[in-house]
Amino acid sequence: MRIAITRETAPHERRVALVPATVQRLTGQGHQVGVETGAGVAASYPDEAYAAAGAVIAPDRGSLLDGCEMLLSVQRPAREDLARLPSGAVSIALWQPASAGDLVSAAAAAGVTVLALELVPRTTKAQSMDVLSSQATVAGYQAVLLGASHLARLLPMLTTAAGTIPPGKAFILGAGVAGLQAIATARRLGAVVSAFDVRPVVKEQVQSLGASFVEAEAVSSAAEGAGGYARELEDEQQRKVLEAVGKHIMDQDLVITTAQIPGKPAPRLITAEMVKTMRPGAVIVDLAVETGGNCELSRAGEVVQAGGVTILGPVNLPSQIPQHASLMFSRNVQTVLEYLIKDGRVTIALDDPITGPMCMAHDGQARDGR
Ligand code: NAD
């Protein structure tokens, strides 16, 4: 099978879909892998490493996509790249399903099959294909480092000849995949860590990482929806959550927010009023900024100063650690490929529990995916 890996062109995207180790595995299985020149450079994987793994380095995108049967990218392909693919080709990428309508129709019209990595079902069987989890892990880690680097103070406790520095306090809102990694990272940096989530089931996970769990009266099993995700809170529950967060946030130094509700705007957990009560020099990192933000004052891609508090709204954090983010992404994609390719051919079965939900276009038809 002819597999192509393109160089990412989205602003600030430094990841690459496959790293040389995965390419080697594919070429070892008899696949032809073409890599656009420079595709891995921003993630610290030079062309030579791909060539050593058996890939053909394509000097331009046209020659790469001609006759390609499988296009692998991190971000969804551009319309002109889709148009170059032969009918029957498959595109696997982060397709951003919510905003992909027109592009998916174009792919369907060109006979291209679209598999969106965001729509891999979150089941035990598909866990090793789940890029949302692997990239959230990287984001949770990087959020803490980013926040720590903007703090006016140290995080660990230090006993020095110049006196003793007490440990900083970190508060993590939302203890899913990113939040749990943020807790672990803040603990490693020596902070005293606390966390809050509306799903009561995470309390034990938070405590097992050495953090304390902030209780709110609203936390009840009603806050847990389908598939282990959170659901939107009723007004009264939301009021109690804000009350609990508001009481706790006043003496925190570093606050990382990761709370999300699938398919809905991010829940508002930190109001402008709460920010006013925080210590000067404190930092908030809002990982939910792209879905509306957990903090009222955060802005996507910006650093906001409010009364001595710094509020960061970083976008695409995994891309800031591109080598390992790509490695994890690549392993996820490799598992997807091994699942799809049987006897050297891709099999798309729309009734399959993994391929079916991922598929947004096939056989000339646009589909809803999940
Ligand atoms: P997510 O990104 O949708 O949300 C992050 C966290 O925000 C969640 O823990 C959620 O409970 C929390 N949250 C939502 N509303 C909140 C509010 N108002 N206040 C505080 N916190 C709020 O979730 P995620 O991190 O992608 O994963 C969530 C669940 O899915 C976890 O149980 C995880 O273990 C599970 N999961 C399973 C698989 C799998 O089995 N393959 C893969 C990934 C995740």
Image (cartoon, rainbow, N blue to C red):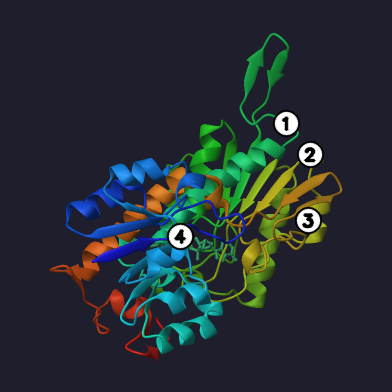
Quarter of the figure that contains the N terminus: bottom left
Task: Indicate the amino acid at tag 1.
Answer: Arg
Task: Indicate the amino acid at tag 3.
Answer: Met
Residue drawn at x 69%, y 69% is: 239
- Give the SS element for disc 2: loop
> Real-space Cα distance between discs 4 and 2?
49 Å
Task: Indicate the amino acid at tag 2.
Answer: Gly
Crowd band around label 3 with a 10 angstrom C-alpha radius: few (<14), some (14–19), many (20+): some
Q: Compare residues 136 and 176 and report the one nearer the observer.
A: 136
Which callout, 4 or 1, points at the residue further toward the start of the chain? 4
Crowd band around label 2 with a 10 angstrom C-alpha radius: few (<14), some (14–19), many (20+): some
Task: Identify the residue under disc 1.
Answer: 153
Quarter of the figure that contains the C terminus: bottom left
In the rendered structure, find residue 176 and report the number of the disc placed on it: none
Mark 2 touching mark 1, by CB under 8 A? yes
Task: Identify the residue under disc 2.
Answer: 281
- Give the SS element for disc 1: loop
- Judged by depth in the image, the label closer to the viewer, 4 or 1, is 4
> Real-space Cα distance between discs 3 and 2?
15 Å
Which callout, 3 or 4, points at the residue further toward the start of the chain? 4
Which callout, 4 or 2, points at the residue further toward the start of the chain? 4
Residue drawn at x 17%, y 56% is: 29
> Real-space Cα distance between discs 1 and 3?
21 Å
Q: Does residue 46 lie above or below 70 as drawn? A: above
Which callout, 3 or 2, points at the residue further toward the start of the chain? 3
Residue 125 in view in this figure: no
Task: Identify the residue under disc 3.
Answer: 274
Whether ligand 1 has any atom under 8 Å from the Cβ at mark 2 is answered as no
- Give the SS element for disc 4: loop
Where residue 252 sits in the image (x, y, percent)? 70, 43
- Give the SS element for disc 3: helix
Residue positioned most to the top: 161
